[in-house]
Image (cartoon, rainbow, N blue to C red):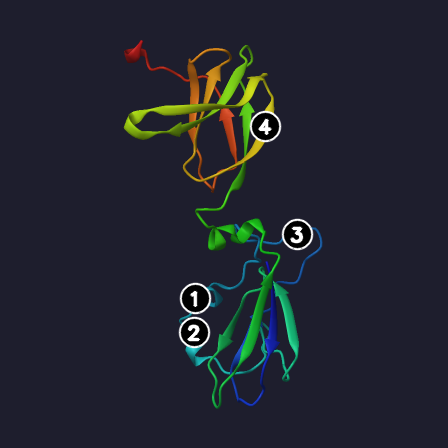
Amino acid sequence: MHTLNIALNDGFEGGGFFYVKPPVPVLHVEREETDDGRPVVPEEYTNYDWLNSLKRENTSDLVFPTLQTGDVLIHNFTLWHAVAPLDVGTRYSFALFYDMDNPAIQDDFYNADDPFHVAFYHEIEDLEIDLVFVEEMDEGQEEIEIVEKNMRPFEEIELDTYDGHLFRALISGTDSVVAEFVMSYDMYEYTIVKKIVPNDEL
């Protein structure tokens, strides 16, 4: 995700937008990153406890860019940034966000009514599979729709689906269930493997 921040005025004193300088890359040394790809910064900058007392002053770690009315600042989601309290006046800005398909921020914008992409991977060596979509009807009835017939071992198919949708892997040409999957937007790949039956159920 990228942010485009437009300054709508400059008639205030102190505070304002600032960012934490990213660590300088060191040759042959891998940069430390968080799980979503942001550079690791000092621990005190990852909470708001220190922010209310922050003054507008550039340091070795913090930068307060000077923005006049109409100036634009563009940065991506990996930049640690915030707004420090003003001393005098009111600050106005207009922020736009684009490149919203970035996987690092999908959870912030997911809508349960939106479809998402998944993949099914068939990992059983000696079996062909029919992949079916199961729609639960009234009074416990089910309607079965074949999505992929005679799926061969080590074959993968991709499709769009919705949160909570139910799929089953059947032995081709039969009603025998090999695996069952309930779709979740935070999971992309589903692997079809043989069920392991505990000894006490044999």
Cβ–Cβ below 8 Å for labels 4 and 3? no
Do residues under tags 4 and 1 come within 8 Å of each other at their CB atoms?
no
How far apart, in angstroms, are the residues tagged by discs 2 and 3? 30 Å
Q: How far apart are marks 4 and 1 (CA)?
A: 43 Å
Q: Give me the residue at 42% from left, 78% from top.
A: 52
Q: Give how far apart the Cα atoms at labels 4 and 2 are.
A: 50 Å
**Mark 4 falls on what kind of element?**
strand
Q: Name the residue under label 2.
A: 50
The answer to whether residue 174 is left or right of residue 60 is left
Front one among 187 and 26? 187
Mark 3 crowd level (few <14, some 14–19, many ≥20, 10 Å Cα)? few
Quick one: label 4 or label 2, which is nearer the N terminus? 2
N-term-proximal mark, 2 vs 3: 3
Q: Are marks 2 and 1 in contact (CB under 8 Å)?
A: yes
Q: Quadrant of the C terminus?
A: top left
User: Is residue 28 toward the left or the right of residue 85 in the image?
Assistant: right
In this view, the mark in front (4 or 3): 4
Q: Percent position (x, y) of residue 171?
A: 48, 13
Task: Name the residue that disc number 3 marks.
Answer: 29
- What mark, if any, has residue 47 been given in the picture? 1
Instruction: Give neighbour class at mark 1: few <14, some 14-19, many 20+ (Cα, 10 Å).
Output: few
| Crowding at mark 4 (Cα within 10 Å: few <14, some 14-19, many 20+) | some
Give the mark nearer the N terminus: 4 vs 3: 3
Q: Nearer the viewer, mark 4 or mark 2?
A: 4
Query: Could you say whether the residue bearing mark 2 is in a helix, strand or loop?
Result: loop
Q: How far apart are marks 2 and 1 (CA)?
A: 7 Å
Question: Which residue bears the numbered disc 4?
Answer: 157
Furthest-front residue in view?
Answer: 138
Are the residues flagged by discs 4 and 2 in contact, CB closer than 8 Å? no
* Amino acid type shown at disc 3: Val
